[in-house]
Amino acid sequence: MRELVTHLSALDPGAAETVKVIAYFDRLVEGRAGLEPIVRGAAVLSGCPARLADDERRVRVRVEPDGRVVPSAEPPDPEWPSAPVRPDGPVALWLERPGPASPVDAMVLERASAAARAVLDRTRGRVVDPASVEVVLDASADERTRLRAAHRLGLGTTARAVVTDAVPLVVPPQWTPPERARVGLGTVVNLVDLPLSGAQARTAFRFTATEDDPGPSVVDYAELGGLAVLADAVGPRSKPVADVTSLENARTAAPWVLPTLVAVAGAPSLRAAANTLVVHHSTLQERLAHAEALLGWPVRDPAGRLRLQLAIALWRLHRTG
């Protein structure tokens, strides 16, 4: 594919860009990526905000071209380039700019909508009744109404809320996350407390990794501890602290920086981090020296490592609201 793109670039730059779009979304589909990475790809490749809406599943995803998830209450403009996710279905995917779609935009819409359709088809069977899921997670609904909805879903005496591929679900306590899925887990609770579990699942989901983040793809709220408090104060619209800005600048300096820092932050030792990265211990030391210079603080002592862990957590929270 790379040779084809190089050859086409010399003959027709537009055709080369189209092939890049096809290859990008093919990789997402092969990796069973969720809705957010797909919409993020549409935004990045088109250079403008992209949004997806599935009314049946109560799913709304909007991503800026810099990769940040930024929800919007404004309705889509009918003049924006758009596409249905399902053939003959309503418009569900938009590129937020006026005027007709360019050839690259048209390919982005075509491939992104097909990838989103694969995700929705993959997850649709998990929810017997989307409306009932919405009710059991709604804290404003009265207890009797929520219990009736839980009964329609066939739940036992306890359950947990989860958010997977940006879709809220209610599942039995023994539920296992799908392979490669991005999942936030709420705690197992009595049925009347599912709204609390739902809020926890949404918080946990914000700490999960994306396709450009080598961190954990499954996060359990019960394991967040005090980090969960940060989610209430930090989001896409809040101003990042200096350490988050330094981390973002370091991340863009070289492709190995973020995987290296995430491995060091999460491993019990530098040797374990080197094993995770499949690099020699001396190579890791060289990389860390460079990364520390980019960050502006040491990460190999306890205080610096804690500072790095906090910066990574805040960086993830700034991406999603």
Image (spheres, rainbow, N blue to C red):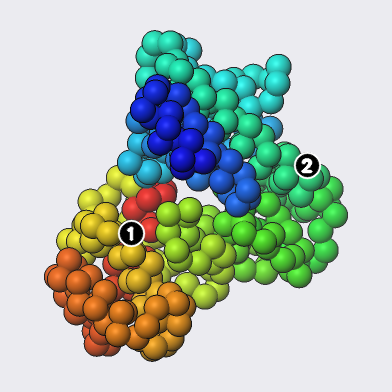
Which circle, 1 or 2, is nearer the viewer?
Answer: 1
- Can residue 148 be seen here? The reply is no
Element marked by disc 2:
loop
- Name above or below for residue 186 compared with residue 118: below
The residue tagged 1 is: 255
- Name above or below for residue 118 compared with residue 252: above
Tell me where residue 277 sits by quadrant.
bottom left
Q: Amino acid at mark 1?
A: Pro
Q: Residue at x 24, y 78 (%)?
A: 286
In x, y percent, where is residue 89?
69, 20
Q: Nearer the viewer, residue 258 or 167?
A: 258
- Can residue 107 be seen here? The reply is yes
Mark seen at residue 121: none
- Name above or below for residue 313 compared with residue 289: above
Count of numbered marks? 2
Q: Nearer the viewer, residue 191 or 243?
A: 243
Q: Residue at x 30, y 79 (%)?
A: 283
Badge 1: residue crowd in 10 Å (few <14, some 14–19, many ≥20):
few
Q: Residue at x 64, y 19 (%)?
A: 90
Tell me where residue 114 sits by quadrant.
top right
Element marked by disc 1:
loop
The residue tagged 2 is: 129
Sequence-first disc among 1 and 2: 2
Q: Residue at x 70, y 21 (%)?
A: 87
